[in-house]
Image (cartoon, rainbow, N blue to C red):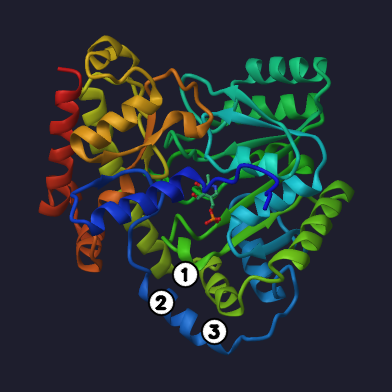
Amino acid sequence: MAVVADWKVSPNLGLNQLVAERRATGESIVHLAFGEARLPPFAPLAEQLAAGAGRNAYGPVDGRLAVRTEVADYFRRRRLPTDPDQIVVAPGSKPLLLAVQYVVPGDVLLPCPAWNTYAPQARLAGKEAIDVPIPAECGGVPEPAALRAAIVAARARGRDPRIVVLTLPDNPTGTLTPPELVREICAVAREHDLLIVSDEIYRDVLHDPATPMLSPAEVAPERTVVTTGLSKSLALGGWRIGAARFPQGQWGERIRAGVVSVASEVWSVLAGPMQQVAEYAFAEPAELRARLAASNRLHGAVARAVHRIMVGAGASCRPPTGAFYVYPDFEPVRDALATRGATDSASLARFLFDAFGIVVLAGHHLGDDPGALRFKAATSMLYGDTVQEQSMALESGDPTALPHISRLLERIEDGFAKLSS
Ligand SMILES: Cc1ncc(COP(=O)(O)O)c(C=O)c1O
């Protein structure tokens, strides 16, 4: 029987499965290849989930007014005045991102590297994904001059770039684009009449709460769709709670109507109990903000520790300020790595797995140059395997000194010390 394409499982989910299989055979593996905030669910969230069990009706496709009102207020508190009718909630932000791609015609411009789902989603929607290099100082946005050049070049070969996707803060680099660069990108988007899709799922995962974050929706409100969710900030990936904010005006309304239409044919609604959780979480009560602050301190401390190890091993690496990733570049020690058979992104990742049992996501899976010696390490995978270890990590003033975390950090440090020596 024929299938219409060479279907692959998303590489991070695929690696996650592989690690589970190898661990089941007793192998000891340091798994840094999955972007999951390994933390237990905050107890009041579980209480809301249980209390919402009676919500078994489908309800409105875009979400009940009560939850959309809380999401609108969440954005209002972030300098984005929002009407509940601009909001759609869904089972994760992933389906919302895909729905936008289905609804808005034209090709998609992506920062390179970028989260590994954007390009496959573009292809699923029949679009070309056009990779544009990120600036030296941060990821999550294309470098503005390169973006202009990519648009002109794509049009010259008959393509029609219409969407640019930004990630603020960024997966995979763990950095946040500074406000002046956000303004520059918005200016390019206006010049070339692009829709901006601003993926802000890590917005509340800043290691230092004082870091200035400017959303493109503040600068170019007429052309920016913002997506967010609770998977990362509240470690609820498996609960699947996402939301999108659409621009006011005719264009935004038409995109939102299209997304609601896709939703009505694919996932129908965000599950009723999850809407109850979302209502509580997007209202940001004090106890939830305290929990968020504790998890952000943990994300920062562990990401900085892994960053130090990578730099110590000879990599250049942007210092992480958000999310829970580092994205080292081992180009400075290319010759030493070549003696170990690590000459490109795939062979470097394979070598780390075979020699030290360390699993990372090779840069080429993120759109990066396959010849480069880069990978993503998800540092949130180091918080522990049990609820008890993860809770200790959350509560500790110095999580990297906890035995279960320091043991893993030492193993990573030992491996990387051998890598280029
Ligand atoms: C940049 C980015 N956007 C979106 C998502 C998807 O999140 P959700 O769980 O809301 O579908 C992820 C998850 O890995 C992500 O890293």
Residue extending furthest front?
A: 1
User: Which residue sits furthest right?
Assistant: 250
What residue do we see at 32% from left, 49% from top? Answer: 380
Nearer to us: label 2 or label 3: 3
Is label 1's Cβ within 8 Å of ligand 1?
no
The answer to whether 275 appears left or right of 254 in the picture is left
Rendered image: mark on residue 52: 3
* Label 1 secondary element: loop
Marks 2 and 1 sit apart, C-alpha to C-alpha, by 11 Å
Mark 2 and mark 1 residues within 8 Å of each other at the beta carbon: yes
Residue located 64% across and 16% down the image? 146
Q: Amino acid at mark 1?
A: Pro
In this view of the protein, can residue 77 be seen by the observer?
A: no
Q: Is residue 130 above or below residue 57?
A: above
Count of marks, rendered view: 3
Dividing the picture into quadrants, the one containing residue 357 is: top left
Question: What is the x, y in percent for residue 278?
Answer: 56, 70
Looking at the figure, which quarter contains the C terminus? top left
Secondary structure beneath dot 3 equals helix
Point out the tag, 2 or 1, that comes first from the N-terminus. Answer: 2
Between disc 2 and disc 3, whose residue precedes?
2
Give the amino acid at mark 2.
Pro
The residue at which mark 1 appears reads as: 285
**Kind of residue indicated by mark 3:** Gly
For mark 2, give the secondary structure.
helix
Callout 3 crowding tier (Cα within 10 Å): few <14, some 14–19, many ≥20: some
Q: Is residue 101 above or below residue 93?
A: above
* Outermost residue toward the bottom in this view: 54
Question: Residue 115's x, y, as percent?
Answer: 52, 39
Q: Residue at x 72, y 53 (%)?
A: 99
Q: Which residue is mark 2?
A: 44
Give the side of residue 279 with respect to residue 304, left or right.
right
